[in-house]
Structures are given as structure tokens and as C-alpha cells.
Amino acid sequence: MRVLVTGTDGYLGCLVAADLLRNGHDVTGVDTGFYRNGWLYNGVDRFALTLNKDIRQLTADDVAGFDAIVHMAELSNDPLAAVAPELTFKINHEGSVRLAQLAKDNGVSRFIYMSSCSVYGAADHEVDETSPVNPQTPYAECKVMVERDLTPMADDTFSPTFMRNATAYGASPRMRFDIVLNNLSGLAWTTKKIVMTSDGQPWRPLVHALDIAQAIRRTLDAPRELVHAETFNVGNSQNNYRVREIAEIVGDTFPGCTVTFGDNQGDNRSYRANFDKIANKLPGSSCDWDAVKGAQQLHSIFSMIDLDQGTFTGRGHTRLLQLQHLMRTGQVDEDLYWRQP
């Protein structure tokens, strides 16, 4: 299958592109290059030819001839969305809907949209794909709006599929240290302590980046009728953890690390997700990783590269810091378009 993958220079994108190439797909990437200077270790064996372009500027010629688009290139950070919500809506909502319409108008029959379990927001019960959404952030609101606007586009020639990922974790050459298990692991390695101001009671479903890549490949390989206009929670029902448990797993994995908790409830986002649908409906779908294996993987990587404090806290692997740097130095304008030198 000829596949266009947006965000191939990102945390997930570089792993997804390599997995698809490794399994026989013809892959072309698209990435605007905001995070290209962040490279943690040599962790993929192949790369997609990547068009250096903003998704908002893609043309009919850019998408024509592809069988499918896997779209994950958005502003993928809740803190950034909170700082610049209008820009987040322009890119994540309007940009994604425009890309889907461009794909449909130019004969691309499959469109996999990387949504998020964050659309559930806060729930006191287990949620599945039929549960009401309750987004708590502009980032999650955009995910809901894209799903809403793409669903009516589904017809005999165009099949969107919505992949609601659990919170990602795990090693990637384009590492992100601004997501929970990765961040706690970085703290454990560089400071030998995890000091939480909250009590750690909120629930989070987790999914390893490589399990997300596998789910995308399974979706592309599945018969069209199984994935047409379908929504899948991506993860495993056994991998719902309280934030407290995640911290304790990391603390146990990194020798000499101490873990302490506060008294307040902190983040109000808390939900446990059910993943039976993807396990039962998508052929071969499974998760090979859990939080323990993920923490062990990160410990091994950090040891191999001798991760230092500057790398962990620097802008190369923290989305908000890198974008703030690009804006502060005038390399991008107020709409996050690159300025020409």
C-alpha cells in the first residue's frame, strides 16, 4: 500500500514510518521539522522520504496517488494548547479537516486519524468507544471536533478510521520527555527522586509507542469493511494505571530512586479505558508492552547513552520548550509558519 504519513519526524512518526516500511508498505512522510534537532539515540533502521512541509500547505499534488494517509502531525501538547488555544484549533482542527477533505477529493481511500483517549477527559467509570466524550483541554477538544467533522465524510470511496490512543510512553529516537512515564523515568535517572505534589490517584491508560505503530499497521492491513468509519481505543485493558502506580513502577525500576507524594488531587483528568473492541475486531491486534517493560526499556536506553540533565530538560525533547524557542528567536511567525532567511 502507498501511504502518506504526517509527522514522520515526531516521537511516534519515526517509529510508525519504520514499522510500515519494514512490513512492505511504500511510505512517504510529511513533517514541518519543528523537532528535527531532537535525536536521542540510534533507534530505527530505516526512514521514509519526507516532504518538509506544513500540513496546512499541502496541495492536491502532494496527496494524489496515495492509497492511505496516516495523520498524526498536530500540536501534540496540552500545555502548548493552553498557551495558544486559537493556534491549536487552527492547526489541529481546521488543518486536519482540510487535509482529510483534500485526501477525499484526490482519491485517497483510507484516512487514519490519530485521536486520543483524552477525549474522555474525566470519568468515574470505565469508558469505551460508545461512552460520552468529556474533553478537558483545547487539545482534546480538537480531537473531538475532527472526529465529528470527518465522520460525515465517510462514503463508498473514503474510509476514515479514528484511533484513540492511550497515553503514549516508551523509547523513541525523537524522544518526548513531556509525557508521564517518560518524564518520571527521566527524573528517576537524572535526579534519583520523583517528588509528586499530587496524591497520584487519577487513572491513566498507557500504551507503548511500538504498540501504537502496530495498531496503525493492523488497521491499514485490515479489510476496509472492518475499519470504515470506526473508532478504536488503542491500548490494552490491563494497562490502566493510577499515576501513583506509574511513579512506583518507575521508582522500583531505577535503583536508588525515591518516590514521594503530596496531598492534593492535582489534575482532574482521570479515566480508565476499555480496549476490548480493538482486540476483538482488528485482526492480530495486541499489546506487547506494559509499564514495567517500558520503564526497563528506558532505563536501558538511558544507561546506553548516559543521559544527562541538559538533554532531559532541554528543548530538544520537550515540545513546548522547542516551539517557544522557535517563536522567541523569530524562526517561525505567530502562526507557526517558518520564516525564510
Image (cartoon, helix red, strand yellow):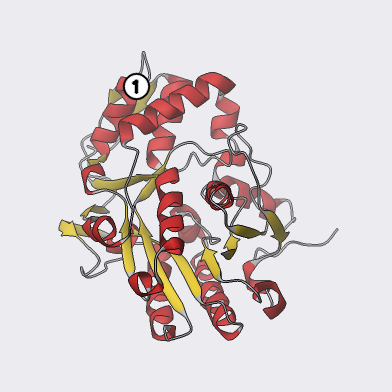
Q: Secondary structure at mark 1?
A: helix
Question: Can residue 196 be seen from the camera position used here?
Answer: no
Q: Residue furthest top?
A: 256
Q: Is residue 229 left or right of residue 11?
A: left
Along the line of sight, the residue nearer the viewer: 202 or 32? 32
Question: Can residue 192 be seen from the camera position used here?
Answer: yes
Along the line of sight, the residue nearer the viewer: 68 or 98? 68
Quadrant of the rendering where the C terminus is positioned: bottom right
Residue 59 drawn at (x, y percent): 69, 77
In the displayed structure, 20 sits above or below 1; it is above
Determine the residue positioned at 56% across, 61% down: 73
Residue 274 drawn at (x, y percent): 21, 55
- Residue type marked 1: Thr
In the displayed structure, 335 sits above or below 35; it is below
Q: Is residue 205 left or right of residue 124?
A: right
Quarter occupied by residue 152: bottom left
Quarter occupied by residue 260: top left
**Number of on-image labels:** 1
Residue 238 drawn at (x, y percent): 21, 43
In the displayed structure, 92 sits above or below 97; it is above
User: Which residue is under mark 1?
Assistant: 253
Quadrant of the rendering where the N terminus is positioned: bottom right
Determine the residue positioned at 20% across, 36% down: 263
Q: Badge 1 local density, few (<14 within 10 Å), some, or many (20+)?
A: many
Q: Residue furthest right?
A: 341
Determine the residue positioned at 55% across, 68% down: 69
